[in-house]
Image (cartoon, helix red, strand yellow):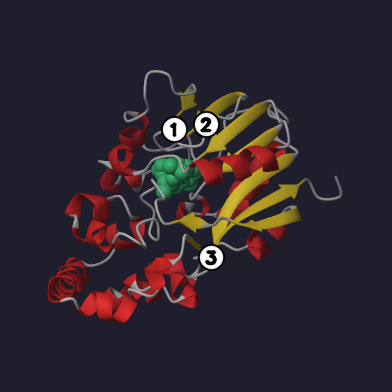
Amino acid sequence: MGEARYDTIGRNYARHRRTDPSWLAEIVDALDGAHRVLNVGAGAGSYEALAADVVALEPSRVMLDQRGADAAPAVQAFAEAVPFANDAFDATLGVLTMHHWTDRLAGLRELDRVAPRHVLTVYEPLEAHDFWLIDYFPETAESDMEVNAPTPATVAEVLDVVDVRTLWVTRDCPEGFAAASWARPHDYLDAERQQAISLLALADADVLARGTARLRDDLESGRWYDRYAHVIEAERADFGYRLVTAVRRGG
Ligand SMILES: C[S@@+](CC[C@H](N)C(=O)[O-])C[C@H]1O[C@@H](n2cnc3c(N)ncnc32)[C@H](O)[C@@H]1O
């Protein structure tokens, strides 16, 4: 495990990844009043305004260094080895992190050990939701992140899943994850933003260069609008992001 991937790809994360208020509302609701919350893979501190006693767990020093002065206290550790006692928390939270874990089941077992309730994001492959960005970067559909997307079934291998809800992506979503800018295509031309989206940051340089050039050409020529203008008329879209609530098996 040792090396933290986000030490390489997370450098400008905080600048481009901001808490989405509609996702935060769903998360607060799913946490169901939990007081002590462990935010696993906490990154720069999004989704911690929970009116609760939050502790952040994050392996990457680069990410920890982007946490603001008023962010929750943080420990540098991996989900697969949580440095807290059994039942130290009421709940754990994991937003857009599980797909990065080296051993998801070991991580889930550790979460189960330290809390009885868990609120975790999972997702379906973007290609399954016809996201137009994949037309420009088709190779990313074959990436490990997409092919081995964590699902409710992944969580159910260790925990009892009690709720799965859709996390809609609004057209003005302030986040910077892969589909956040679905209605703002020019965002995907920005090299710094691309590096804050792991799907693109982990793609080969030539894949990234080729797709970016095609997208730029299509936006400049108007071809992009001919193909996709109808898509971006909606107020919100479902790109397969799901919020799973799970509890201790038999609990
Ligand atoms: C896409 S970021 C999400 C950060 C934050 N949860 C958010 O929503 O802004 C993924 C985070 O998971 C962390 N991560 C990667 N592998 C991990 C592991 N094995 N255990 C815990 N966190 C991990 C990364 O360092 C990174 O900060």
Position of residue 168 in the picture relative to residue 61 (left or right)? right
Residue hosting label 2: 48
Neighbor class of circle 1 (other Cα within 10 Å; few <14, some 14-19, many 20+) is many
Q: Amino acid at mark 1?
A: Gly
Residue 8 drawn above or below residue 44: below
Find residue 22 and report its horizontal and vertical position in percent: 54, 45
Q: Is mark 1 within 8 Å of ligand 1?
A: yes
Residue hosting label 3: 240
- Name the residue at the top extreme: 69
Q: Are marks 3 and 2 in contact (CB under 8 Å)?
A: no
Indicate the secondary structure of the residue bearing disc 2: loop
Closer to the chain start, of discs 3 and 2, is 2
Q: Using the rendered view, name the quadrant where residue 210 is placed.
A: bottom left
Q: CA distance from mark 1 to mark 3?
A: 23 Å
Residue at 32%, 37% in the rendered image: 14
Find residue 26 and report its horizontal and vertical position in percent: 62, 45
Q: Which quadrant of the figure shows ligand 1?
A: top left
Q: Are marks 1 and 2 in contact (CB under 8 Å)?
A: yes
Q: Is mark 2 within 8 Å of ligand 1?
A: no
Q: Amino acid at mark 3?
A: Gly
Closer to the chain start, of discs 1 and 3, is 1
Residue hosting label 1: 45
Residue at 85%, 44% in the rendered image: 251
Residue 197 versus residue 179: which sits nearer the camera? 179
Indicate the secondary structure of the residue bearing disc 3: loop
